[in-house]
Amino acid sequence: MKKDDILKTIDDHNVGFIRLQFTDINGLLKSFAVSAKDIETLLSEGQSFDGSSVTGYGAIEESDFIVKPDPGTFTLIPWRREHVSARMICDIYKPNGRRYDGDPRYIAQKAAQKAKDMGYLFNCGPELEFFIFGNTESGYLPMDTGGYFDSHPGEAAEDIRRDIAENAEKFGLRIEVAHHEVAPGQHEIDFRYGELVETADRLLTLKMLVKGSASRKGYLATFMPKPIFGENGSGMHVHQSLWDIKNNCNAFYDENSKSVGFMSELAQHFIGGQLKYGRVMSLVLASWPNSYKRLVPGYEAPVHIAWAHRNRSPMMRVPDVGKRANAARVEIRCPDPAGNPYIQLAVLCYVGLEGIKQKIECPQPVEENVYNMSFEERKRRGIQSLPETFADALAEFEGSIIMKEALGDTLFNNLLTIKRQEWEEYRTHVTQWEVDRYIGML
């Protein structure tokens, strides 16, 4: 939206306040409200704030930051009808006028620019899974007992998904699919693909809408990857493609290709890059200790670094789209929805482009169920596994040159510091499982 359109909308709807939104390094939404009367100054100069208490934004002695809202993200908040408010997603600057290198949105913008410099637009479409719980005297319990694609018209789950979808449309998201997932209380909502930063903005928005819609109905929505033992966890499969700017076509499709799915050579190098760097980018794509409770065999979560055409057991697959050139894409299945969408998509873009630059060879597809292979068979075929624990992922990330290149020194070091602290708290905590299992035995 342009400046004049924003001013007119504020005047027409008597907007009182504007919520300025951004994420901390973990991807958690941050926001503060400012008067809409100051919109012109806000758009030209931004708004200063203390960043020392925002996770991953630096120490107290370097706390001065400025948020500058992106006019294209201006949207009226649909559920604030009596006291009308709007929201805008912001970029983070230092007082000297330079972009803050630790701003996750800046990292995403730089990755998108890297693609453009190579002649491509990085398009991506995530599938967002989440759980909805009721808070009872017995604790958090799934809001329903439904399974995959179950439909119960009139139930709260249907109402919440519809409310999310209707509000999402008002924020400019084109919802394509909404349905119940495999586990009790688990749901999925997908929106139409877009460019990198646009998609990350939409992910941030949709996660806000999911939590808000559930809360207004008296429930709690969570993107925790594995909240229930013995049930499927929540993933965020990401469909990816590159659009050739010069030739105005999908660079992942080649009608003369003998590869499955008519994949172009460029697409195969892109897959090669993501497979090669699968272990080192795991900390970004699965960024919490709980993420590695999801990445275990037996629950439809990919743990093996391989790719296939139709087979969903490896880390990546190429969907069967026939000869629909514009639909050609690759899907990566290991990310989860609890991470920072800006740096998740940025890293996926960066390592895929590195695969193209380095002409990394794409291995042969693995169409057999990898879960059923023995360790010796996987070793013989060169199939590695993703890190098994958060500590393993930390170690892989810490030693990675390409992750430091993709994220920049500031965000790389900030993320490493924050995640080390998270692991230390997790590592030293005594769980109820340990007490129940060992206190009488030992």
Image (cartoon, grey):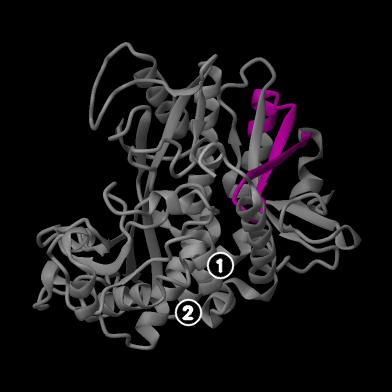
Q: Nearer the viewer, residue 137 or 263?
A: 137
Asked which quadrant contains residue 83, the reply is: top right
Give whichever of discs 2 and 1 has the lower sequence position. 2
The image position of residue 169, as x and y in percent, is: 43, 33
Point 51% across, 58% down: residue:
197
Pick the quarter of the image with the N terminus. top right
Residue identified by numbered label 2: 117
Residue identified by numbered label 1: 394
Asked which quadrant contains residue 122, the reply is: bottom left
Point 59% across, 74% down: residue:
398
Instruction: For mark 1, give the secondary structure.
Output: helix
Mark 2 crowd level (few <14, some 14–19, many ≥20, 10 Å Cα): few
Between tags 2 and 1, which lies in front?
A: 1
The image position of residue 94, as x and y in percent, is: 80, 63
The image position of residue 387, as x and y in percent, is: 43, 66
**Residue 228 shown left or right of residue 84 in the figure:** left
**Residue 265 shown left or right of residue 338 in the figure:** left
Q: Amino acid at mark 2?
A: Asp
The image position of residue 89, as x and y in percent, is: 63, 47
Q: Nearer the viewer, residue 104 or 192?
A: 104
Please indicate, yes or no, whether residue 119 appears anywhere in the rendered image.
no
Residue 195 vertical placement versus 166 (above, below): below
Point 39% across, 26% down: residue:
161
Q: Provide the residue span drawn in magenta.
A: 9-35
Q: Nearer the viewer, residue 182 or 128?
A: 182
